[in-house]
RNA sequence: GGGGAGUUACCGAAGCGGUCAAACGGGGCAGACUGUAAAUCUGCUGGCUCUGCCUUCGCAGGUUCGAAUCCUGCACUCCCCA
């Protein structure tokens, strides 16, 4: 199967500038392509996965990927797909973000390959030195305003009347597409880059780049977009109540990341497997069948979580996330070390108590629940225990008078308390 | 300025002299069921040194053996008439 037919099968192709020819064009020889990443935060998130994986798929197929971080375009703000004018980030903040993104990309792309190494560039490097007058004369001259006004990203913001929510648009954002268009021209000059890939909201910017290249140099460039990653209910993938799902372990722990995918709706699982994993068509189709026959087993979600966690956080973090999952969903906790518990329960509140309280026979289960913060009052703690909702190391504790001693420790000095199904807290006895 | 209604626990809302820590609903917390879903069902839901004690029914006083319930004053909210 060719790269392109695989992408098609996965549903990764939304539009191309050359539907009939692109498959053969890619098969013909090594091509260089690029995709851009917005440095609006210092970490990539689930939304960036599509782009990273796209570049990765191309690299694995022997092509040469360029990841462009928008140090310059980020200063302007891409209006595509946005209903409101964006706040500008400071230069310092942008610089920090650009560096953060670069580090994460090494997980997905091989920058040292001898045949087709990936490349990471920052468009500030070639855009920062333009003077305003030069830019207007050399670039701006090639942009008919009527064409610019016809782009969806502009139209949707200028719509009057029926589109009452439209927020207008500043000249700054209106100029955005010129910068991105020039990126493409620059990359084609500098690196022979002929293809730009992006989310479907990038179509207008991509074609703007292709037009500019034709006008300035008479060269033919190509574009390709992937669909936006949305759930069956129409909302964006990668958002939780507590915010975006990040690829940075500091922001979204590997456990939370793993859990996010485990909880993907049945209706979205097939799509996610196709769009976000590198599993083969055979494997994915078997998972589709399994999902219909035995949805309760959730093999698709497990596989999805496994593949993505491994890719983003590595094998070791995956193992920890899986171990944590086992524990969080009831497995009795025993024979672990402080270090392991600390890692698994990284997201759980903990409290330190004096070790002597374990020896003197005064610390009851009720006290422990209150100390840990799992219960607000002793009355509440008592109720929890009486109703069978109190656990230490995932073993139910009966009787409100139960005294805690060192034999309840799960490791050298840590005890794992749980109230109800999934509220955990650690007590450290030091 | 005149007349009326109200202020109850996390929220809404009963209670109108003792059996009221206060009905009922929502929320919350546990349990069962279950696919780490949704729905459903059950129990609990002021605090504590817990067969009892303490603090709560706008605030402050008073009547009474006894008040969330009656009286007086104060504060705030709402409605009607000017």
Image: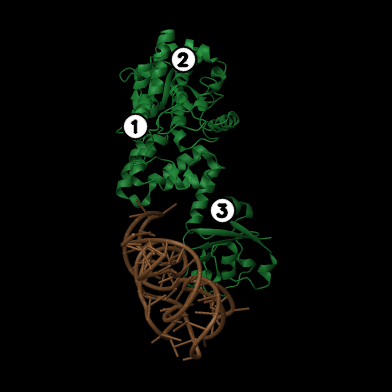
Does the image show residue A279? no
Q: Nearer the viewer, residue A343 or B15?
A: B15
Residue A101 is situated, as x and y percent measured from the top left of the image, at 55, 32
Q: Earlier in the sequence, mark 3 or mark 2?
A: 2
Where is mark 2, residue-wise?
A: A185
Subunit that carries the residue with mark 3: A
Q: Which of A109 and A97 is in front in this view?
A: A97
Residue A168 is situated, as x and y percent measured from the top left of the image, at 40, 30
How many residues crowd mark 1 within 10 Å: few (<14), some (14–19), many (20+)?
A: some
Where is mark 3, residue-wise?
A: A345
Does the image show residue A328? yes
Residue A302 is situated, as x and y percent measured from the top left of the image, at 42, 46
How many residues crowd mark 3 within 10 Å: few (<14), some (14–19), many (20+)?
A: some
Q: The green chain is which one?
A: A
For image coordinates 36% across by 46% down, the residue present is A265
For image coordinates 35% across by 17% down, the residue present is A146
Do tag 1 and tag 2 residues touch (Cβ < 8 Å)? no
For image coordinates 54% across by 39% down, the residue present is A248
In the depicted structure, whether residue A388 falls above or below residue A32: below
Q: Which chain is brown?
A: B
- Is the C terminus of chain A in the top left, top right, bottom left or bottom right quadrant? bottom right
Where is mark 1, residue-wise?
A: A11
Which type of secondary structure does the marked residue at label 2 adopt? helix
* Badge nearest the viewer, 3 or 2: 2
User: In 3D space, how far apart are the residues under numbered discs 1 and 3 (Cα atoms)?
Assistant: 37 Å
């Amino acid at each position: 199967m060719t790269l392109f037919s695989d992408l098609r099968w996965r549903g990764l192709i939304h539009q191309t500038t050359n539907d009939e020819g692109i498959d053969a064009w890619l098969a013909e020889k090594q091509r260089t392509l690029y995709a851009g990443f917005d440095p609006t935060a210092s970490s990539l998130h689930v939304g960036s996965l599509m782009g990273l994986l796209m570049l990765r798929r191309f690299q694995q197929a022997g092509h040469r990927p360029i990841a462009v971080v928008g140090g310059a375009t980020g200063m302007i703000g891409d209006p595509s797909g946005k209903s409101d004018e964006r706040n500008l980030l400071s230069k310092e903040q942008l610089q920090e973000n650009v560096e953060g993104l670069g580090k994460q990309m090494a997980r997905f792309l091989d920058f040292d390959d001898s045949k087709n190494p990936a490349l990471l560039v920052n468009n500030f490097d070639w855009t920062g030195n333009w003077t305003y007058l030069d830019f207007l004369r050399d670039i701006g001259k090639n942009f008919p305003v009527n064409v610019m006004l016809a782009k969806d990203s502009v139209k949707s913001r200028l719509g009057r009347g029926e589109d009452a929510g439209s927020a207008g648009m500043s000249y700054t954002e209106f100029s955005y597409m010129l910068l991105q268009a020039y990126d493409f021209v620059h990359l084609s000059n500098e690196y022979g880059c002929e293809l730009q890939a992006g989310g479907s909201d990038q179509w207008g910017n991509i074609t703007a780049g292709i037009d500019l290249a034709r006008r300035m140099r008479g060269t033919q460039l190509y574009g390709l977009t992937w669909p936006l990653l949305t759930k069956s209910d129409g909302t964006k993938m990668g958002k939780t109540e507590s915010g975006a799902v990040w690829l940075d372990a500091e922001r979204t722990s590997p456990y939370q990341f793993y859990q996010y995918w485990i909880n993907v709706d049945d209706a979205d699982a097939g799509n996610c497997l196709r769009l976000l994993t590198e599993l083969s068509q055979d494997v994915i189709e078997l998972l589709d069948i399994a999902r219909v026959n035995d949805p309760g087993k959730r093999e698709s979600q497990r596989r999805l979580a496994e593949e993505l966690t491994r890719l983003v956080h590595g094998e070791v973090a995956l193992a920890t996330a899986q171990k944590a999952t086992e524990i969080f969903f009831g497995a009795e906790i025993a024979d672990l070390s402080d270090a392991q518990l600390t890692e698994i329960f990284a997201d759980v509140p903990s409290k330190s108590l004096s070790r002597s309280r374990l020896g003197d026979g005064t610390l009851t289960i009720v006290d422990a629940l209150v100390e840990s913060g799992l219960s607000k009052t002793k009355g509440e703690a008592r109720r929890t225990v009486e109703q069978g909702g109190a656990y230490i190391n995932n073993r139910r504790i009966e009787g409100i008078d139960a005294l805690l001693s060192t034999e309840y420790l799960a490791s050298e000095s840590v005890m794992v308390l749980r109230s109800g199904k999934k509220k955990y807290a650690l007590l450290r006895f030091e």
